[in-house]
Image: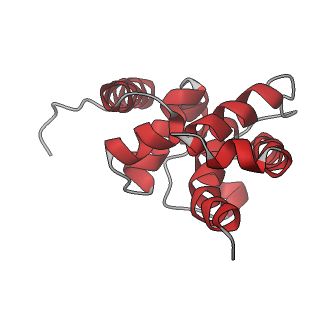
Amino acid sequence: MDAFDELIAGLRPGLARAFAAAYGRDRGEDALAEALAWAYEHRSRLLGMENPGGYLYRVGQSRSRGRRDSGHAFPAPSVLGLPDVEPGLPDALATLSDRQRACLALVVVDEWTYEEVAELLGIKRSSVQSHVERALHKLRKGLGVDQHADV
């Protein structure tokens, strides 16, 4: 395996999760395909970059911008056979920005560090933290969950 293949093997899972979280399954797959197609076309350029993951995220983001999924990007939990998921979660997730969803999913679901997410998305660590905090606040508000209530 050459250096390029190793780089792509390391970046692909994180990019796939970030795109799926930000845009939903279908558009996320399109964004990943666009990013990887660009990467293969520009191998030598990509290998010389300081943050190739962040650059590929931007490529996938911009090249898939005009493609919106028809219908809801986040299907109802019952459709997926997930009975223990809050039914209002898909609609609440849809109110978040793409960046908030990506940061939230990578930090909360995939348990990445703020630094790892920042590097992948090509943003500052403090921005990742801010996106996660705002996303959680917006989700709690949208779901009617009082974060200060006694449990």
User: Is residue 25 in sight in this rendering?
Assistant: no
Residue extending farthest to the left is 150
User: Is residue 112 in sight in this rendering?
Assistant: yes
Asked if residue 127 is positioned above or below residue 149 in the image, the reply reads above
Q: Is residue 117 left or right of residue 54?
A: left
Q: Is residue 121 left or right of residue 111?
A: right
Asked if residue 95 is positioned above or below residue 145 in the image, the reply reads above
Residue drawn at 55 percent across, 34 percent down: 93
Residue 63 percent location from the top left of the image? 82, 29
Residue drawn at 66 percent across, 56 percent down: 78
In the image, 31 versus 98, the foreground residue is 31
Residue drawn at 39 percent across, 48 percent down: 116
Residue 125, picture quadrant? top left
Q: Is residue 106 left or right of residue 81?
A: left
Residue 8 percent location from the top left of the image? 66, 60
Residue 145 percent location from the top left of the image? 32, 32
